[in-house]
Image (cartoon, rainbow, N blue to C red):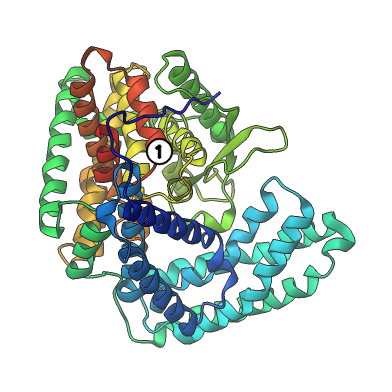
Amino acid sequence: MIVLAVFVCLDCSPPEKEDNEALAQLNEFIQEFTSKGGSRQFTTDMSAATFASELSETKAQLAKLRSIDKTSLTGDDLIDFKFAESLLAGRELEQEKMLPWKKNPRLYMAFTRISNVIDRPGDGADKIKEIEERLKFVPLQLSNASRQLEMYVPRFQELSLFMAENGSVLFDEELPAFIKEQGNDAAHLTGLTLEAKNALESFIIFLRDELPTRPEGDFAVGEETYNEMLKGQFLTDYDADSLWKFGWEKFNATLAELVEVAKKIDPNKNWKQIAYEIKQEYPDPEDMIAAHQEWVDKAGIHIKSNDLIPIPWPERVFVVPRAEYLRKTSYYGNFSSARSMDKDSIFTSEWMINPFEDQWDEQRKQEYLVEHDWGVIIITAPHETYGGHHVQSLYQLHNPRPLRKNNGISIFSEGWGLYNEQLMQETGFFPNERIYLRQLQLRLWRNARVIYDVGMHTGRLSYEEAINIMTDQVGFLRWAAQLEIDSSTARPGYFIGYFMGMSEILLMREEYKKKMGDQFSLRDFHERLLKIGNMPPSLMREALLM
């Protein structure tokens, strides 16, 4: 049972009429705003006119929100106003200045998400209806991509071609199997599948032959736009310059910690030598999924038995292989949070990892194994599952405030994941100092993300220099570093959330501890923080300490 605290103000005056009007306007706005969420990007033609219309809609929504007298709002209502404004400010910035639809072909390949529809729990008729709607737009989306991509960004083209070529398995195997399984009710999807397949084949030719002939461009968004993102969307006090300095300061501080821990383990070796040895210890490749599942389960036991975070819902996490066409979008994998109960009435999340593949050559096999060592498994399991993304997403799913239930931001959610790595170290989950050193190395990676994200998108750092930081200073192999850097080029600002978010959560913990005194507990802090939502840290702090 979930018990929500209700705070009653005994000495407050009744709200004035205009206060009620402002709150009513805000609630009406939020209801309209949340009703427009979901999968709209998958069911539009992605034409230039559509993108222009979306920008106009965003500007109209911002104007409507800002017409509300926010001086009449207080407490959580004022926080919701600020959160909605930050979300729209970020959307406006992307639509008006970042313009990914002019340079990133992967944006148009929304068809890849149809696999998620096929695989998720749910009624077959509902799946058929949604797949039909999405399939109808695939030829339009890919045709518009061929017309609207104005610039050739070499790495974007390479990654898009890989995704498109591997995405053909959806039309060749997955959809035909689904149609066969569903019988006559899905027979009409066969023609749509063929049309989408033909459109994809034409798009592959475009990506391979025509796109490289267009003017070469850059993925960087520029310093002015980056600063607007930091201030308007993330609500931080940083600009690009101060964030760049912060990133290097924390990077060097983590390096110093690594040196100290290495001395304790073996004073005759430096931290890189020890980290290299740790990375040579990995599960049997055929047992990779099972090894991840083992440490997911152990992380869950640790969180629950130590009463670190209450989890009042029936839930579980499965580790599964990642779909093939997604495997070049990151070197490790991704996490899919439960959005509803499954057929067993349990909230089930999935941690999808890139599996070991027998067809690789020996070098590729060895490179994979040393990036999936026991250390990274033990440390990443809490980040993704208990009590990281799996637990945070459950709290967000059950948030009673619609805006916070349906919206989140990486600067808290990814910060929360990294915070859980630190929490597990503090509470004795990691088995020895060697795993602690590996944790610090992985934190150094997140420190580096701050540096290369702000650096590459504001011209302080080149693509190759970013890769060199990851290989020479953090210790990644080049192929893994390249996939890591690629993600940042396409998602400006996302990766700064890990370390910045963790830092802000640790500061909030100290502030809340001072406020509560002897009444402080980690369980209470975590529960209160997660019940607030998934917002910029400045808003989380405001709600926590109000």
Residue 489 in picture, x, y percent from top left: 32, 63
Viewer-proximal residue among 411 and 161: 411
The residue positioned farthest toward the right in the image shown:
184
Amino acid type of disc 1?
Val
Taking the spot 82% from the left edge, 70% from the top edge, the residue there is 188
Q: Is residue 483 visible?
A: no
Residue 153 in picture, x, y percent from top left: 35, 75
Viewer-proximal residue among 512 and 249: 512
Q: Is residue 115 left or right of residue 9?
A: right
Q: Quadrant of residue 455?
A: bottom left
Viewer-proximal residue among 512 and 96: 512
Q: Is residue 154 above or below residue 478?
A: below
Q: Quadrant of residue 199?
A: bottom right
Q: Is residue 479 left or right of residue 356?
A: left
Q: Secondary structure at mark 1?
A: helix
Taking the spot 55% from the left edge, 29% from the top edge, the residue there is 293
Q: Quadrant of residue 148?
A: bottom left
Of the 4 image quadrants, the one containing the N terminus is top right
Q: Which residue is mark 1?
A: 370
Q: Is residue 145 visible?
A: yes
Q: Is residue 437 left or right of residue 189?
A: left
Q: Is residue 366 above or below residue 95?
A: above
Q: Residues within 10 Å of mark 1 (few under 14, many from 20)?
A: many
* Total numbered badges shown on the rendered structure: 1
